[in-house]
Amino acid sequence: MKIKKVFYSIIGLAIISIALFSFIPTAKQDAGNKRSVSGFNGISLGGPFKVFVKVGHTESLRIEADDDALKEISTEVKNSTLHIKQKENLKFWGQNKKANIYVTVKKLDNISVSGSGSLKVEDPIKTDKMELLVSGSGTISLPITAKEVGSAISGSGTIHVSGSAANSNIKISGSGTFKGLDLKTNKTTVTLSGSGGADVYADEELSATISGSGNVNYKGNAKTTNTTTSGSGKIKKIE
């Protein structure tokens, strides 16, 4: 009986040890989550990923995903833009696979999202000019201080901007949404074609061209409101 008890005790300890070690990431696995990136001031996202961006003194990229998912994510800096995209295995990403990607930037002045991914900038960005583009159902969210912000949406995507800018230029084709009530501007220009909508803040001048059923809602003390509408779309001041 004693021999059997000792035997089963050894087996039990062996199973526990294996279980514990399986939860400890190896150095190789940890290194696979971090990728060397440098020399970029723009980010292009093409894939069903969640990207979180911080501003710092160094540039970095870290991916949280299963080992098999890591192999299907391409990251490359080209023409001063960090490209993050899924590889050609589209069937793989249709299996509810997920990836969170954390990026640190020194400078950022253009962001594009194509597909269903999301990109959120967590620290305020300071730049002269920012270009934002969403094509598909993706989202961009960021706080900013800039002289000029250009935003374009084609599809059902969303751009959410807060902070301040001298000028904001917004173009929406499709059912997309621009959320900018927290972006205080001097002058805002909006062009809508389709059912998309824009919520904006303008203190000096607001110009809107609407073709379709889209609406422009605005706050602020815009003294001049130039509007052209064709369709059922409307422009409305809200409190």
Image: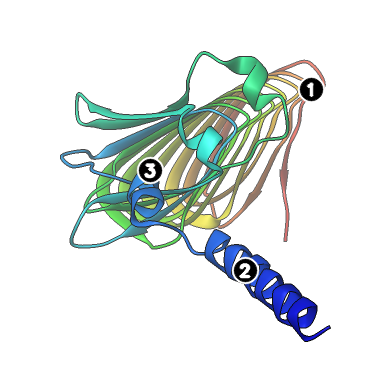
Q: Earlier in the sequence, mark 1 or mark 3?
A: 3
Q: How is the image coloured?
A: rainbow
Q: CA distance from mark 2 to mark 1?
A: 67 Å
Question: Dividing the picture into quarters, in which one does residue 97 lie?
Answer: top right
User: Residue at 46% of width from left, 59% of height from top?
Assistant: 25
Residue 210 in sight in this render: no
Badge 3 is on which residue? Answer: 167
SS for tag 2?
Answer: helix
* Residue 178 in the figure: left or right of residue 161: right
Q: Is residue 139 above or below residue 6?
A: above
Please tell me whether mark 3 or mark 2 is closer to you in this view: 2
In the picture, the quarter occupied by the N terminus is bottom right
The residue sitting at 71% across, 28% down in the picture is 196
State the CA–CA distance, disc 3 to disc 2: 66 Å
Amino acid type, residue under disc 3 in the picture: Asn
Numbered tag placed on residue 14 in the rendering = 2
Kindly report which numbered mark, 2 or 1, lies closer to the viewer in this rendering: 2
Residues 86 and 186: in front is 86
Tell me the residue that label 1 is attached to: 213
* Mark 2, other Cα within 10 Å: few <14 / some 14–19 / many ≥20: few
For marks 2 and 1, the one nearer the N-term is 2
**164 sits left or right of 157 in the view:** left
Q: Is residue 198 visible?
A: yes
CA distance separating discs 1 and 3: 25 Å
Image height check: is 221 above or below 132?
below
Please name the amino acid that badge 1 sits on. Answer: Ser
Q: Could you tell me which residue is drawn at 23 percent across and 49 percent down?
A: 107
Comparing 15 with 200, the one in front is: 15
Q: Nearer the viewer, residue 152 or 19?
A: 19
Give the SS element for disc 3: strand
Q: Going from the N terminus, do you reach mark 3 or mark 2 first?
A: 2
Depth order, front residue of 197/207? 197
